[in-house]
Image (tube, grey):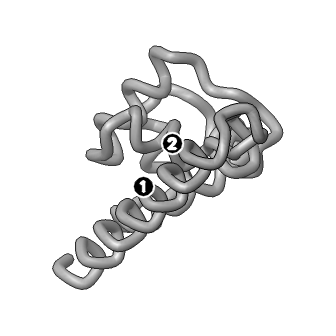
Amino acid sequence: MAIDPVRLGAGIREFREMRKLSRPQVAERLGITESYLSLLESGKRGISTPNLNKLADVLQVPAAVIMFKGTTDDGTGGKELTALMRQIRRLIDTLLAAEAVCS
């Protein structure tokens, strides 16, 4: 299992949009520039642990869930881990869809 910066950035963008927050709003709350947030969302920059934790607070999503959205199966975990990751990913997507309907 590895972190893919592009997947991580897409997950950050997905959570931001789900919360109906603009880039300027999130950037201001994190104390970073809007352009840096754009680079994070496009996978061109990484995020520090302190900023990940702040971002999780702003987006009201556990940091572990944000990180999981950025994971990719690199084949080192075996078939069981790959199957488990697929199930967890589907569960997260289902929960996000349900929350979007409720908000």
> In the rendered view, does 78 fall on the left or right side of 99?
right
Query: Do we see residue 16 in this rendering?
Result: no
Give the camera-side residue of 98 and 1: 1
Which quarter of the figure is the N terminus placed in? top right
Secondary structure beneath label 2: helix
Is residue 56 depicted above or below 53 in this figure? below
Give the camera-side residue of 80 and 20: 80
For this orientation, the residue located farthest to the right is: 44
For image coordinates 51% across by 42% down, the residue present is 68
Residue 33 coordinates in the image, percent (x, y): 62, 34
For this orientation, the residue located farthest to the front is: 79
For image coordinates 53% across by 59% down, the residue present is 86
Amino acid at dot 1: Ile
Task: Give the crowd class for mark 1: few <14, some 14-19, many >=20 residues within 10 Å.
Answer: some
For image coordinates 29% across by 67% down, the residue present is 95
**How much space separates mark 2 and mark 1, taking CA atoms?**
9 Å
- Residue matched to label 1: 88
Question: Quadrant of the rendered structure where residue 98 is?
Answer: bottom left
> In the rendered view, does 10 fall on the left or right side of 55?
right
For image coordinates 74% across by 32% down, the residue present is 76
Answer with mark 2 or mark 1, whichever residue precedes in sequence.
2
- Residue matched to label 2: 68
Residue 64 coordinates in the image, percent (x, y): 40, 34
Secondary structure beneath label 1: helix
Q: Are marks 2 and 1 in contact (CB under 8 Å)?
A: yes
Amino acid at dot 2: Phe
Task: Give the crowd class for mark 2: few <14, some 14-19, many >=20 residues within 10 Å.
Answer: many
Figure disc tally = 2
Question: Quadrant of the rendered structure where residue 30 is?
Answer: top left
